[in-house]
Amino acid sequence: MQMASLKNDDIKQIRKLIPLATLSEGRFKQLCDGVSVETGKKGTVLFQQGDSTKEFVYLLSGTVSLQAGGVEMDRIDGGSEAARFAIAHQIPRKVSAIARSAVRFVRVDSEFVNAPEKRDSSHQEAYQVSDIPEEAGGDWMTTMLQSRIFQKLPAANLQKVMINLEEIQLKKGELVVRQGDKGDYYYIIKSGRCSLMRQPSPGAKLIKLGELNASENFGEDALISGGERSVTVAMMCDGSLLRLGKSDFLKLVKEPIIRFFEYKKAAQMVKDEGALFLDVRTPESYGARKLLASQNLPFFSFRTKANRLDSSQKLIIVCDDGKLSEAAAFFLIRFGF
């Protein structure tokens, strides 16, 4: 095998790999400084079954055969959607990876990728859709992976999420979710646009609340809270959505990013670190019984009033049963808190 330094085209291709697309510019540059492109001819072994080296191996070009006990289990072609994921990433390796043609590939330190990335809330390195380079504009996956939620997921979880996503095709006017229904899926818009509507009271007309575009997501509130859908979502044009089942969403997405504290610890954080209790119950419930050093922002007001909160303030979300708190915390993480 031979090694070569990265070229601009290599860097662009590597930037779209999963989960490398979630790294900040600084971390990605640091990663690239330690990465070289390896080349091999047909028959080259990229790694052996049972190997425990903590690294992600990505195929840039060529074809690789995945074999267990000498039997081919699968093949991966460079440039394919499958090649955006690390090859057989489980450690120890369940299969051997053997080149079926001339190949180019890179090895990346998995511990570096998995290490939590500290973000200064005052630093404008946070990704917004408008910040993504023009060349990536048509790549829904790269755009989606720049979201704060996906940036916070461990690499293993992110890979499982991408594998478990199911694509569905919908026509203009079709309902995706209906207000009042139980939540069953988390949705990501791959192509097309959706409208968000709400019926304020039984028999009333639907009121349009807003629109969602490609790479935006919805549906988490009912999954986390266990309640009913609070809005109706309909397709504004033909398009395709990706959906993740409730159990996969809760296990792979929600659990890794929401932290829980006992009251004693939380109260200490309020006292010593200037944290604030944010109570997301209704004003009536809050007025009847509330914590000291708390502020009320009902969950039903989050979409219109959360921008009034100080993103540099450490917040501890509270409610009666923890469900609304989880949904509120997830919402705030999505928008940079």
Image (spheres, helix red, strand yellow):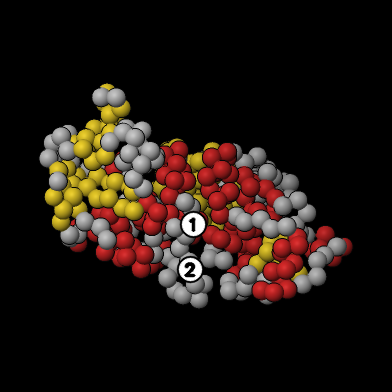
Q: CA distance from mark 1 to mark 2?
A: 11 Å
Residue 71 in which image quadrant: top left
Q: Is residue 142 left or right of residue 135?
A: right
Question: How far across and how far down the image is residue 213, in percent?
Answer: 45, 55
**Which residue does the image show at 70% across and 53% down from the upper left?**
324
Question: How far across and how far down the image is residue 117, in percent?
Answer: 45, 63
**Which residue does the image show at 62% across and 50% down from the upper left?**
221
Q: Is residue 67 above or below residue 59?
A: above
Residue 140 visible to the viewer: no
Q: Earlier in the sequence, mark 1 or mark 2?
A: 2
Question: How far across and how far down the image is residue 303, in percent?
Answer: 61, 62
**Which residue does the image show at 44% across and 58% down from the upper left?**
115
- Residue neighbourhood size for the residue with mark 2, other residues' Cα within 10 Å, grouped as few (<14), some (14–19), many (≥20): few
- Which of the two residues, 216 or 119, is positioned nearer the viewer here? 119
Q: Is residue 27 left or right of residue 100?
A: right
- Amino acid on which disc 1 is placed: Lys
Q: Is residue 66 left or right of residue 226?
A: left
**Which residue does the image show at 38% across and 67% down from the upper left?**
131
According to the image, label 2 marks what residue? 119
User: What number of labels is visible?
Assistant: 2
According to the image, label 1 marks what residue? 152
Question: How far across and how far down the image is residue 104, in percent?
Answer: 18, 47
Q: Secondary structure at mark 1?
A: loop
Residue 125 in which image quadrant: bottom left
Tell me, for residue 45, which label it has, or none.
none
Q: Secondary structure at mark 2?
A: loop
- Amino acid on which disc 2 is placed: Arg
